[in-house]
Image (spheres, rainbow, N blue to C red):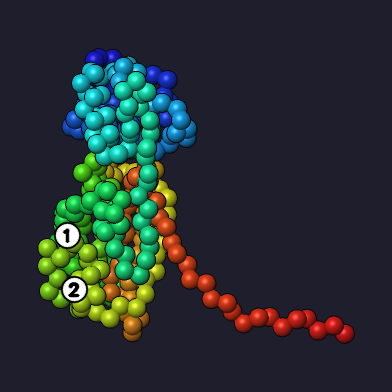
């Protein structure tokens, strides 16, 4: 094999090797693999590997390691103290699935402001699966939105959203880069949503847009929002990096009618 072969980090079987044929810069690849290591770190008292250890682990230059480490330190994932080494200080951002779903504000409150890039914003015909979720005929006009959400450190999520034409109205691309739910609140009388959360592994989209190694863990949130008449207003899904976030759900409890005690004969 030549010098461009993929090298597996020595002594770290759970970490993906560096791909020297990838268009992704080496320091970004190292940074993403360090994020994976940080997310699975179980002993906060144990020091993170030193620059020299990481240099040997990934077979890259010390400068590449320092560039990757600097971003993690600046983002608050690692804490470096002269003479004491580097400690892991990762806190996953917790997305609270609330009625208003103010995701951007939640990330900002954790010190990770979100930037949204709209990749697709177009009127298209609904596919069979999308039409089924929206309870419309296949081929009916919908507004399709695809976007990537990113922190200053890394992309964190891909969103796919499908809105029937009668609810999409005059939604603009600028609104699509903000809270789509807020845009819908002003155009429909929203009532409730159905959410499903699955675990999965990264594929082509996640490798390209979330900078994840193939086969990395991801969280998938499927959603359908309804108006007060019970009509679906928006459907879609979001794919998140599982190493950077988790979901939190608050459930309102209501006491049901008490069962009558069994009669004794």
The answer to whether residue 46 is above or below residue 150 is above
Determine the residue located farthest toward the top in the rendered image.
2
Per the image, the residue denoted by label 1 is 177
C-alpha separation, residue under disc 1 versus residue under disc 2 = 15 Å
Q: Is residue 139 visible?
A: no
Q: Quadrant of residue 8?
A: top left
- Residue 106: assigned label: none
Per the image, the residue denoted by label 2 is 168
- 84 and 65: which one is in front? 84
Q: Residues within 10 Å of mark 1 (few under 14, many from 20)?
A: some
Q: Position of residue 131 (x, y in %)?
A: 29, 70
The answer to whether residue 172 is above or below residue 113 is below
- Local SS, label 2: helix
**Residue at the spot 23% in from the left edge and 41% down from the top edge:** 153
Q: How many marks?
A: 2
Q: Quadrant of residue 84?
A: top left
Q: Position of residue 66 (x, y in %)?
A: 23, 24
């Amino acid at each position: 094999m030549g010098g461009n072969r993929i090298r597996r980090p020595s002594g770290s079987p759970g970490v993906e090797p560096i791909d020297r044929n990838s268009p992704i810069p080496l320091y970004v690849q190292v940074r993403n693999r360090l994020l994976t290591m940080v997310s699975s770190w179980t002993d906060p008292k144990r020091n993170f590997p030193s620059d020299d250890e990481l240099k040997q682990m990934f077979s890259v230059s010390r400068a590449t390691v320092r560039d990757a480490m600097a971003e993690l330190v600046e983002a608050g994932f690692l804490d470096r103290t002269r003479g004491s080494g580097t400690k892991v200080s990762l806190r996953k951002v917790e997305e609270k699935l609330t009625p208003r779903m103010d995701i951007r504000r939640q990330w900002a409150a954790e010190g990770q402001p979100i930037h949204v890039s709209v990749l697709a914003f177009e009127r298209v015909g609904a596919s069979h699966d999308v039409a089924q979720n929206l309870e419309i005929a296949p081929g009916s006009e919908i507004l399709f939105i695809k976007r990537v959400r990113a922190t200053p450190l890394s992309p964190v999520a891909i969103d796919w959203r499908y809105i029937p034409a009668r609810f999409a109205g005059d939604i603009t691309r600028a609104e699509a880069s903000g809270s789509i739910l807020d845009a819908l609140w002003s155009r429909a009388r929203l009532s409730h949503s159905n959410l499903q959360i699955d675990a999965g592994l990264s594929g082509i989209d996640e490798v390209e847009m979330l900078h994840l190694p193939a086969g990395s863990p991801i969280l998938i949130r499927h959603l359908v929002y309804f108006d007060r008449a019970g009509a679906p207003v928006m459907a879609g899904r979001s794919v998140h990096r599982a190493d950077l976030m988790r979901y939190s759900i608050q459930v309102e409890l209501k006491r049901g009618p008490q069962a009558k005690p069994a009669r004794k004969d």
